Image (cartoon, coloured by chain):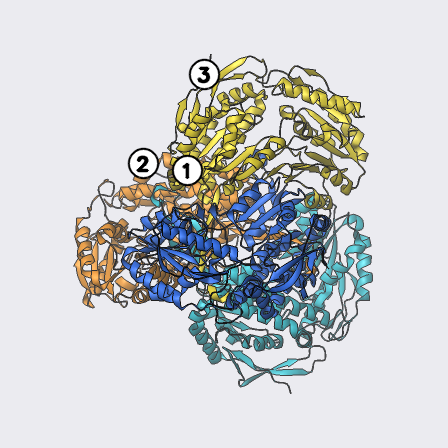
Chain colours: A orange, B cyan, C blue, D yellow
Amino acid sequence: MLECKIFLAGNFITTDQKLDVTNKYTGRLFTQTFLADAKLLDKAISAAEKAKPACKDLSSHEKFAALKFIAEQLENKKAHLAKVLSIESGKPIVYAIAEIERAAQTFLIAAEECKRLPKEYMSLDWTPNGKGKEGIINYFPIGIVAGIAPFNFPLNLAVHKIAPAVAAGCPIILKPASTTPLSTLELANIIHETDLPKGMVSILPMDRKTGNLLVTDERISLLSFTGSPVIGWELKKQSGKKKVVLELGGNAGVIISKDVDLKKIIAKCITGAFAYSGQICIHAQRFIVHTDIFEEFLSLMKKETEKLLSGDPIKKETRISVMIDEENAKRVANWVTEAVAEGAILVCGGKRKKSFYEPTILTNTTSKMKVNTEEVFGPVICIEKYNGKIEDAVKKINDSKFGLQCGIFTDSVSELDHCFKNIEVGGIIHNDVPTLRFDQMPYGGIKESGLGREGVKYAIMDMLEAKILVK
Amino acid sequence: MLECKIFLAGNFITTDQKLDVTNKYTGRLFTQTFLADAKLLDKAISAAEKAKPACKDLSSHEKFAALKFIAEQLENKKAHLAKVLSIESGKPIVYAIAEIERAAQTFLIAAEECKRLPKEYMSLDWTPNGKGKEGIINYFPIGIVAGIAPFNFPLNLAVHKIAPAVAAGCPIILKPASTTPLSTLELANIIHETDLPKGMVSILPMDRKTGNLLVTDERISLLSFTGSPVIGWELKKQSGKKKVVLELGGNAGVIISKDVDLKKIIAKCITGAFAYSGQICIHAQRFIVHTDIFEEFLSLMKKETEKLLSGDPIKKETRISVMIDEENAKRVANWVTEAVAEGAILVCGGKRKKSFYEPTILTNTTSKMKVNTEEVFGPVICIEKYNGKIEDAVKKINDSKFGLQCGIFTDSVSELDHCFKNIEVGGIIHNDVPTLRFDQMPYGGIKESGLGREGVKYAIMDMLEAKILVK
Amino acid sequence: MLECKIFLAGNFITTDQKLDVTNKYTGRLFTQTFLADAKLLDKAISAAEKAKPACKDLSSHEKFAALKFIAEQLENKKAHLAKVLSIESGKPIVYAIAEIERAAQTFLIAAEECKRLPKEYMSLDWTPNGKGKEGIINYFPIGIVAGIAPFNFPLNLAVHKIAPAVAAGCPIILKPASTTPLSTLELANIIHETDLPKGMVSILPMDRKTGNLLVTDERISLLSFTGSPVIGWELKKQSGKKKVVLELGGNAGVIISKDVDLKKIIAKCITGAFAYSGQICIHAQRFIVHTDIFEEFLSLMKKETEKLLSGDPIKKETRISVMIDEENAKRVANWVTEAVAEGAILVCGGKRKKSFYEPTILTNTTSKMKVNTEEVFGPVICIEKYNGKIEDAVKKINDSKFGLQCGIFTDSVSELDHCFKNIEVGGIIHNDVPTLRFDQMPYGGIKESGLGREGVKYAIMDMLEAKILVK
Amino acid sequence: MLECKIFLAGNFITTDQKLDVTNKYTGRLFTQTFLADAKLLDKAISAAEKAKPACKDLSSHEKFAALKFIAEQLENKKAHLAKVLSIESGKPIVYAIAEIERAAQTFLIAAEECKRLPKEYMSLDWTPNGKGKEGIINYFPIGIVAGIAPFNFPLNLAVHKIAPAVAAGCPIILKPASTTPLSTLELANIIHETDLPKGMVSILPMDRKTGNLLVTDERISLLSFTGSPVIGWELKKQSGKKKVVLELGGNAGVIISKDVDLKKIIAKCITGAFAYSGQICIHAQRFIVHTDIFEEFLSLMKKETEKLLSGDPIKKETRISVMIDEENAKRVANWVTEAVAEGAILVCGGKRKKSFYEPTILTNTTSKMKVNTEEVFGPVICIEKYNGKIEDAVKKINDSKFGLQCGIFTDSVSELDHCFKNIEVGGIIHNDVPTLRFDQMPYGGIKESGLGREGVKYAIMDMLEAKILVK
């Protein structure tokens, strides 16, 4: 049996509580790792406390060297890491490879950004009493960061917390999802080879109760959580004096205007709809299509969806595989059944086999149905029409408690401007699905989709405190 | 009897609940105003909701025109406003005038900053899949802002919420302190003359229970609170999904190094120590003095303190007057008594007469005593020595749960650098007391002194949400 | 006879050389002013030298106060100033009023920008030998600025040199055009009322030979010239060690795509074509129109052009009046005659009466004809077609030695993107004529249209020198 | 005989004109390379013209990949390159190695900066007519860059032109110094391995007459020259319409205040004084020492100078070797002789042996003597005293036509502030010699020391043209 130690402040350790990680496709045990308990977590926090001065004193060169090394090693070990990630998560290998590449890119960006931490210099002589005065503003590490990462991008979404923390000079304790801790623990091995201070990084699987101590412990200055809206907002309440960043989900939409060449965009739409079975925060869940091309789009999507190759995620040709667990597949199945009962039309898909759920297209849904209005986090999309006026499409998109990203296919300047000004989200993606994200861009939602922005530079900003010197 | 209406979404109204505002020096009733109840607050929030689109669509020219007009009117009505402020707060008129001028300056800065709201434009082609892609990032109003302002700078600390909100395009509901609502309500009259959308600004005195709805109502997107640490941190817990900015207090310190000409700095030290009876978040509470000049500094401070003219705040020559109420004067008296009992030495002051408390100097205090370690918010200072090494002084300053600002008098580059790097505060003031603040600079504390930064540009930033257009 | 003194380092003086300024419409003498000779210019330069330290030491508050005062006075005296400007230049009063307003705006922007001069603060620890090092970069006034302004916007284009110079803390010597010095000398009266150091501003009409000393004198650090390309590039050669900014002209174009509602845009096109008889650097000289709408556009333009009211510029209803002098009117007439001889078709206009030249439309021109390829600086436009592909339109626009601004009317994202990327100019104006300029935006040309950018912030930047403190 | 081809637009070629490169220490022929003539240069310019669109279209990822590859290869080949550089220039190998490392760092910075090219996004609705308008400002490559590099840092000063040009997307033609072309031609081999467009980079030794075509050819948009002031300013005159950046020399000074521990700083002073025999633009030529410590400093410097190991530059222990040629050594010898004749006191050194000149200390010099007032560019320094007041020291430093950098050793905040505000240079180096430069910082002089700033980000800025899209 493979055994994978967990990473406590520079030491690889085992604990009494074993954690089984299954191959999500076969359902068989893949590797055993360990859960940290409250006592070990306390040790990690104490070590982080102790490491704070050393972390703060790291020169940008030292941080750059470590971050760049990590980025290079991720590239070097890409094949191995992608395999682990694919197995632990059920994610098709092509997407797993892309995720490793993005994680490497995220570290590279952090390497570059740590040389460019915000610094300001301003005149203060705007009033007579300020004559001769100036302000020099430096940004210092905020303190210990707690990161909680989800199962769906087990590596890169953890990296979006770890890399900025290192760049900012903050110790970090990262809790990976219990279902998919292995790729992050592989990363720990790479981090361990750098010269970063011991105690700067801990990566510890925990049960939810222990993990909650990350939320409540007052020695921690920032909680950065990526996960489901319900849990995220609950954590905010318990977070005490600490700053909180929430990266939650949504029911992202796409608008498809009339002047679009559907054949050219269909591949993007299929990827946005069904990549990793829709278990993506910016999964393209709602397609709002110009009434004149609605039927054509629907039939094209159906055709392409039915071509999607399902199977073992480890195979290069697989495009869709199992969901993270059967519980979620059942939940999705129920939502679809419920929707159909309420009047939705099933265009294709709709069947479940254990934790596999077919890529599914619905139409005639309403914002009263869960498949439309809640975060489906599964391979289900709703394709609906709008009356041809962009205002109508935008209204439909905004009819949601969420607001993460939105795609818009159009060549009209006025339509695009209208969308940018009026769609209530954190990101508008022109001529692409909402599922697109570049790791340097500000990323995050409004409304119930989150609080704050990630994207390396923006995440770093949240991990720093301004201090002004008035001279 | 003077009667002052309250300002609900563009209407001046009265309510059933009268609020007496006393002349703090005479203790007699000065003016009656009104408290808003939950129903009226709900009306204000609804009006703000309705005003959101109009507020968002304001051009920078329209916001500029309104903000500049307000700044000019504050200057024009300075004499009257300062008198009202002085009477309602007991603040010596020289300081009241300075506060009106700062409030005008705060509006002027907001007028200028609204033309310069953050906007970003970035390349996204850092990876092959980004070829040809760019990001355009605009910042949109976050939604409704709730502002809660304290009694001690009743106008300018309210303005630090109202002016940025207008600049950002956010409706705001401001709750002034119940003891000092009048100067803010005078401001309402000026705001009313502008072309800002009705419903953009409401200024409503409320009791604490009603005020708490500002914290819990989910239609409000940002809570900006200035006040005491205990209350501030409690509000954060109840704030639901909204963003929270806390500007709390502290026990600010000053370091006085050996090479300083004490005669030149003593006036600044006296102002930092006793202006408005120390009821200032950045009141210079702890003086940490080089051992070689400690005795000289102590005797100089005693001499100058004893010269301070007390009396009616409305008189030009008055430098110290009553505290906000007798309850606080008693609290301060108790803390001093307690400290002396525990070994502190009373250098001067220490007597109370109703709500007046003498300017008081203690020495031989420790960080176990409330006068040293809690926010005294009264005319009491502790003068202590350090061993001559800057590290020792910094350690003493950092031996506090608070971290707002700190002064340092020195001509040594290495001492100043050490202070800037190591003192745990939001602002280091070189060759001046920590009590110095310019309205454009980032201002706010770390540790238990707060969360986030004010200062017009920084406050605006918190009232905006980034939205990226990926093209 | 009215007499207008000239402004030498804070003194209003007369000289031996009188300069007659005519009413351009009547041709009669309007006011006499004076030319400075080499000796007086030397005095102005010496005074500027002497004023350098005082100018550099101005706080932003002091500069702000002066610049804001000037802006307000320009607004206050708008009616008078516009009249002077209209008479001395022949510019219709509606445009003259707009110019005064813009000059006030330019000063206001400078007032705001002087508080926000560039300042940088950067880490220098990117390599091991930089450990602990930081750089603080402040920008200091470059030294004396020489400004040479043209006749066509006699006030605002001078202000685009004076206002930034004051904001930057640089003394400036401004040479107005000899034909139109009066509005700038009126400005001198306002400047004189401020507290700016004597010697900071001189406004001196000069003949070309004396003016050339501004170019060659090595005490001057920056030459900022606005005028004709031929002269501008010649000055660069003679400029010695000084920095040079050239704001020259061009033969700006407009592209009109197919999807445009011509009725909605025609008023803008007429203004771009004939405002101030085309004597504008960004005069819309070349219209490149989609072949499908070419005929309709041509006939609409003809119709609207023929409606233009000509007459005394001082009258509110006048839209077109005399050119600056008969020499230029003759030159334009010759170019049109020449073009027609070479195959151009005269659509309307084409007649001259002394210094008045009719608003004239040509078509069938080629880039061999002066009316098309040189800067016509008169009320003449060429309307040509493109084949419907945006690449063709862009090619036609780029077939020019100039590159200042270009307008593009379209609702197509891809067309607009193509234009932005490929048109060789300093500014692309979407859905408007190239004649649009906002005073805060970066403005200036590439190719033979100039060197560097104006626009307050950008002009200031050119007047500053970076100095880094490595700590 | 070694033969080194030259690099014309992606091809390694030979020409009719051979160029002998000697081993500067032995005086013997080291390698033969070639001179390009006017015809070949024309070919390079044509190729650059042709490459412009491809260079402009490079994504930041493509530029990043090439620049990073070059940086890595420079590190990989460091030993070899340093040897070539040491032999061709006579530079001690320790300094040659440092130069290769810096060149690698310069490419690395350019790799990072090309992703962060300036881009602006601003509101234009500051006036009523701007309602709804915004400006998007992108920066496009300026066109072909001509770089002329000096002999003293033959690699890194060429790299400070090549790396920014690639980052900016500009083709570049680089003329290395004829005495030291080899290390740059080695670089060409590395560049050749990248995917950069053919024609983007040419590296061509030329005689001065041919090189002058780089200055006059109007197809070239920017001339970036590093070299002697006399030549630099002359080139500016001939530069036609192109933009010009001049990085020239000076007679940099150092101020040593009283409170300094001389033993701790002496090593830095010796390096600043005699590294590469003072053939450095920021060679510490003038030491201005507090009168109280003047004698001690003088004797310490003498002692340490006499310890400097001279010899073959290729040996690790060598700290001083030959100058670039005998002509320069003679010139320096003459200047010293002249100074002594005029009253200067020779403290040590002063002897010449062929192209070797001893490290030489003078005192009692005046600003009339060439050794003090001209750029000595040799191993000669002047040590003088100031009266103890910082104003006196600053006055002495400013008594120079040059203004590149200045060092200041002090722990006094007020002295340092005075220096930063008042010393007329591009850079103040605190607690170090003026010889310090980091490759990311803005670097360049005022007065006769140059025009514009290098430092990767700043050099890139000069190679770009702003284009605004007004929407």
What residue would you read off at disc 3?
A: D3
Upstream in the sequence, badge 3 or badge 1?
3
- Above or below residue B306? Residue C343 is above
User: What secondary structure is marked by label 1?
Assistant: helix
- Above or below residue C225? Residue C179 is below
Chain assignment, label 3: D
Between circles 2 and 3, the one closer to the viewer is 3
Q: Where in the figure is residue A276, as x and y percent of width and height?
A: 27, 49
Name the residue: 29% across, 51% down: C389
Q: Nearer the viewer, residue C108 or B205?
A: C108
Between circles 2 and 1, the one closer to the viewer is 1
What residue would you read off at disc 2?
A: A79
User: From the viewer's perspective, is D262 left or right of B456?
Assistant: right
Q: Are marks 2 and 3 in contact (CB under 8 Å)?
A: no
User: What secondary structure is marked by label 3?
Assistant: loop
Q: Nearer the viewer, residue B14 or B213?
A: B14
Give me the C-alpha separation between circle 3 and circle 1.
Answer: 30 Å
Q: Quadrant of residue C100?
A: bottom right
What residue would you read off at disc 1?
A: D63
Q: Quadrant of residue C17?
A: bottom right
Give me the C-alpha separation between circle 2 and circle 3.
Answer: 45 Å
Q: Nearer the viewer, residue A355 or D81?
A: D81
Give me the C-alpha separation between circle 2 and circle 1.
Answer: 26 Å
Judge the density around disc 1: few (<14), some (14-19), many (≥20) Cα neighbours within 10 Å: many
Name the residue: 59% across, 43% down: C243
Determine if residue D324 is in view. yes
**Type of amino acid under label 1:** Lys
Q: Are marks 2 and 1 in contact (CB under 8 Å)?
A: no
Between circles 3 and 1, the one closer to the viewer is 3
